[in-house]
Image (cartoon, rainbow, N blue to C red):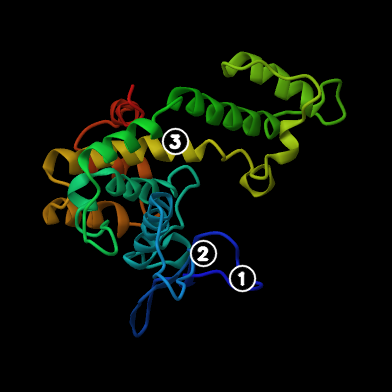
Amino acid sequence: MFPRPNKYGHAAAFSVIMGKMTDNGYKQPATALVCNFPKPTEYQPSLLTHDNVETYFHEFGHLVHGVLTKSPLVSYAGTSVPRDFVEAPSQMLENWVWEKESLSLFAKHYKTGEVIPDELLEKMIAAKNINSGTKALQQVFYGIYDFSLNDGYNPDGDKSTTDLIKELKNNVTLYPYQEGTHQQASFGHLNGYGAAYYGYKWSEVYAHDMFSIFKSEGILNPKTGLRYRQIILEKGGTEEPIDLVKKFLGREPNSDAFLRSMGI
């Protein structure tokens, strides 16, 4: 949970044992949850910011996706799903850190036991949604740029990667390209994602749509949770994500809940 020398510096869920069917029965999976939260001191325990808690819930979403799998094959077990769905269970679980009902169960002052006041939570949500549309457009820009580089871009042609940045920046976002900048140089996800960066936002739309079922039926409703486990988490990559989402929702997915989450 805490940082130490030479340790992975971010938060992540790493699969240690993948689930699979064997001659001796089902091999139960195991996942390691790695975090780097503030260490306790002699004066106080380890105290988490709200952002820390959101990170924990996100990675825990990956963890339950991994350990609750019932896929008979390793290649389809747990988080072995298409890139544009793998972040859906993790991002969906983040919603619980913005709900009073769930926060009141654990998010308390370490000395007094006071829960987060309603007024403060409302301000936190309002702060989260500042420029939410602009930030969403920025992610769309990154996704299109990633697509463009992996779909017919000729590095030996007349158009440089910076020219492409300029073109998309001016067409997609609300902020014009700033001459002399090279945004692609700090876009680390270009290495390893291969035309799949859009998956973050795509997954987020699924995440909020699925959470809308919990909102309507109760965010702590065990029956809804069991349905989610059986339909989404246990299946892993054995079925197409869109089919699983439709089955859980009982309808076609849409972006309504996603827009509401941004205050739009």
Q: Which residue is mark 2?
A: 36
Question: Residue 168 got which mark?
Answer: none
State the residue lying farthest toward the bottom: 24
The one of 1 and 16 positioned closer to us in this rendering:
1
The one of 85 and 48 positioned closer to us in this rendering:
48
Q: Nearer the viewer, mark 3 or mark 2?
A: 2
Left or right of 71 in this view: 170: right
Total labels: the figure holds 3
Q: What residue is shown at x 28% (from left), y 40% (from top)?
A: 120
Q: Which residue is mark 3?
A: 202
Task: Name the amino acid type tagged 2.
Answer: Asn
Q: Nearer the viewer, mark 3 or mark 1?
A: 1
Q: What residue is shown at x 13% (from left), y 45% (from top)?
A: 218
Mark 2 closeness class: few <14, some 14–19, many ≥20 residues within 10 Å: some
Left or right of 107 in this view: 189: right
Q: Position of residue 64 (x, y in %)?
A: 34, 62
**Which secondary structure, mark 2?**
loop
Quick check: 26 above or below 142?
below
Q: Position of residue 28 (x, y in %)?
A: 35, 76
Q: Position of residue 222 (x, y in %)?
A: 13, 56
Task: Answer with mark 1 or mark 2, whichever residue precedes in sequence.
Answer: 1
Mark 1 closeness class: few <14, some 14–19, many ≥20 residues within 10 Å: few
Task: Name the amino acid type tagged 3.
Answer: Trp
Q: CA distance from mark 3 to mark 2?
A: 27 Å
Task: Answer with mark 3 or mark 1, whichever residue precedes in sequence.
Answer: 1
Mark 3 closeness class: few <14, some 14–19, many ≥20 residues within 10 Å: some
Q: Which residue is mark 1?
A: 7
- Asked if the residue under mark 2 is in contact with the one under mark 1, i.e. CB atoms within 8 Å, the reply is yes
Task: For the C terminus, give its image quadrant.
Answer: top left
Quick check: 77 above or below 167?
below
The image quadrant of residue 5 is: bottom right
